[in-house]
Image: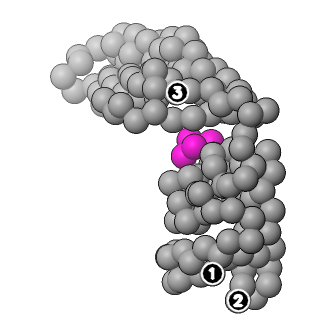
Amino acid sequence: MSKKISYYTKDGLDKLTQELNTLKTKGRADIAKQIAEARDKGDLSENAEYDAAKDAQGHLEAKIAQLEDLLSNARLLDETKIDTSSVSILSKVTIKNKKNGASMTYMLVSEEEADLKAGKISTQSPIGKGLLGKKKGDTALIKTPAGEMEFEVVNISA
């Protein structure tokens, strides 16, 4: 599948590993049980429950393969060695919207760990991409779905 290397925090990597283990054990067992129950109901050629269970099995196996691929290209980042001279992955960056003066603090993370409610944005998002490499005091002009926005990098921390 993909050969794209993704960087994760320890928590993010643990969550992915835990999800994969759950899908491989509980997920597969649940699907096998559904298939067995549907098979017991008779003629498989006209059994919608059997078809649905087989479809669900296909989706589960695709998700497992996707997670295995993701984990095979995952790298753990040491949060204690983050360079705070410029914005990079795992940086906590405080930015100020130059138009309305609003300040926000985000942590830049991989796509899979992004959670806006928790203040984590992806390095692949428009704002994340626009902030990468910026230094404290720099201005970033970022094209967002809402239009072009101008942000000042106020602070960078680990």
Q: Which residue is mark 3?
A: 74
Image side of residue 25 versus residue 97, left or right? left
Q: Name above or below for residue 104 compared with residue 54.
A: below
Residue at the spot 53% in from the left edge and 60% down from the top edge = 129
Q: Nearer the viewer, residue 30 or 39?
A: 30
Tell me the quarter of the picture where residue 11 sits. Answer: top right
Which region of the structure is painted magenta? 109-113
Q: Which residue is mark 2?
A: 99
Image side of residue 42 versus residue 21, left or right? left
Image side of residue 20 versus residue 13, left or right? left
- Tell me the mark number nearer the camera, choosing from 1 and 3: 1
Q: Name above or below for residue 131 compared with residue 63.
A: below
CA gap between label 2 and label 3 equals 38 Å
Q: Which residue is mark 1?
A: 150
Q: Nearer the viewer, residue 107 or 132?
A: 132
CA gap between label 1 and label 3 equals 32 Å
- Residue 16, percent from left and from top: 59, 27
Asked if the stretch drawn in magenta spans residue 8, the answer is no
Q: Helix or strand or loop: what does disc 1 sit on?
A: strand
Residue at the spot 63% in from the left edge and 81% down from the top edge = 150
- Residue 139, percent from left and from top: 65, 76
Which callout, 2 or 3, points at the residue further toward the start of the chain? 3
Q: Is residue 104 visible?
A: no
Callout 2: 10 Å neighbours few (<14), some, many (20+)? few
The reply to whether the C-beta atoms of the residues labelled 2 and 3 are less than 8 Å apart is: no
User: What amino acid type should be assigned to the residue bearing mark 1?
Assistant: Glu
